[in-house]
Image (cartoon, rainbow, N blue to C red):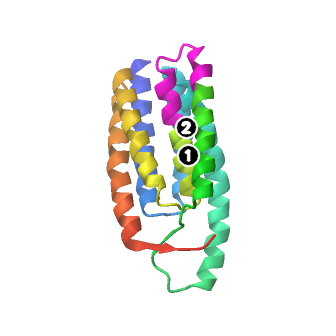
């Protein structure tokens, strides 16, 4: 059973690397890969007792389905409006959205940390921090805010420590790759980014 868990975690990590590669390139198919990755990692996190990260996968599944649909509608409309646009679309993060989403994230962090502290979760506060930062970054990604990459870098650093402490080596390697891809994403989006209005 241990070998199966390891191989399944490796498979989930490969799906995750595929997802983040598509994310950097801002391909709509990334949401399909997020859906698959989320199902796989929901199982991995359940097995390891990281319940905040497990619960996060349900949020990812919802975001994958809803954003895949929204991006499909938007891309068809924008294609008609601007056939010559070959850049990566980005939006400016306004202070109201930033403060509101960070405030909600802070409340969610405290609530999840407390709740999962009552379970057999081995690292409830670190688990909750990684989960909440992931939710924030995914929300900002769905809106195409470039600032999402900075949140991912912080989240990935916390996650790397979490997975090292749990001996989850394939997932730790995945999050090292995520960190590299997040840095790549910042440069690529800055270089090719075309600011669009809300």
Q: Position of residue 185 (x, y in %)?
A: 38, 59
Q: Give the quarter of the figure containing the N terminus.
A: top left
Q: Which residue is mark 2?
A: 132
Question: Which residue is found at the position 42% from the left and 32% from the top?
Answer: 9
Vertical placement of residue 45 versus 187, above or below: above
Q: Position of residue 18 (x, y in %)?
A: 42, 51
Vertical placement of residue 118 versus 154, above or below: above
The foreground one among 54 and 140 is 140
Asked if the stretch drawn in magenta spans residue 128, the answer is yes
Q: Label 1: how many residues lie within 10 Å, few (<14), some (14-19) or many (20+)?
A: some
Marks 1,2: beta carbons within 8 A: yes
Q: Quadrant of residue 120?
A: top right
Q: Which residue is mark 1?
A: 136
Q: Give the quarter of the figure containing the C terminus.
A: bottom right
Vertical placement of residue 184 versus 167, above or below: below
Structural distance between the alpha carbons of marks 1 and 2: 6 Å
Question: Which residue is found at the position 41% from the left and 34% from the top?
Answer: 159
* Image-based side of 83 in relation to 17, left or right: right
Q: Position of residue 179 (x, y in %)?
A: 35, 46
State the predominant SS element of the stretch in magenta: helix
Q: Position of residue 43 (x, y in %)?
A: 54, 29
Count of number-bearing discs: 2
Asked if the stretch drawn in magenta spans residue 134, the answer is no
Question: Which residue is found at the position 62% from the left and 34% from the top?
Answer: 107
The foreground one among 101 and 40 is 101
Question: Which residue is found at the position 37% from the left and 65% from the top?
Answer: 188
Instruction: Find numbered disc 1 in the image and state the secondary structure of the residue it sits on.
Output: helix
The magenta span reads 113-132
Instruction: Find numbered disc 2 in the image and state the secondary structure of the residue it sits on.
Output: helix
The disc placed on residue 94 is: none
Q: Label 2: how many residues lie within 10 Å, few (<14), some (14-19) or many (20+)?
A: many
């Amino acid at each position: 059973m241990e070998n199966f868990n390891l191989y399944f975690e490796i498979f989930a990590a490969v799906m995750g690397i595929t997802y983040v590669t598509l994310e950097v390139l801002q391909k709509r198919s990334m949401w399909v890969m997020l859906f698959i990755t989320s199902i796989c990692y929901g199982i991995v996190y359940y097995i390891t007792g990281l319940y905040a990260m497990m619960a996060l996968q349900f949020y990812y599944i919802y975001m994958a389905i809803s954003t895949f649909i929204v991006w499909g509608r938007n891309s068809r409309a924008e294609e008609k409006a601007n056939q010559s646009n070959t850049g990566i679309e980005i939006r400016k993060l306004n202070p109201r959205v930033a403060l509101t989403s960070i405030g909600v994230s802070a409340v969610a962090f405290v609530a999840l940390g407390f709740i999962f502290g009552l379970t057999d979760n081995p690292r409830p506060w670190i688990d909750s921090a990684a989960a909440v930062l992931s939710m924030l970054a995914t929300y900002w990604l769905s809106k195409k805010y470039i600032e999402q990459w900075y949140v991912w870098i912080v989240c990935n650093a916390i996650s790397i420590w979490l997975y090292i402490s749990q001996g989850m080596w394939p997932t730790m390697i995945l999050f090292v790759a995520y960190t590299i891809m997040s840095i790549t994403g910042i440069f690529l989006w800055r270089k090719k980014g075309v600011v669009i209005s809300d």
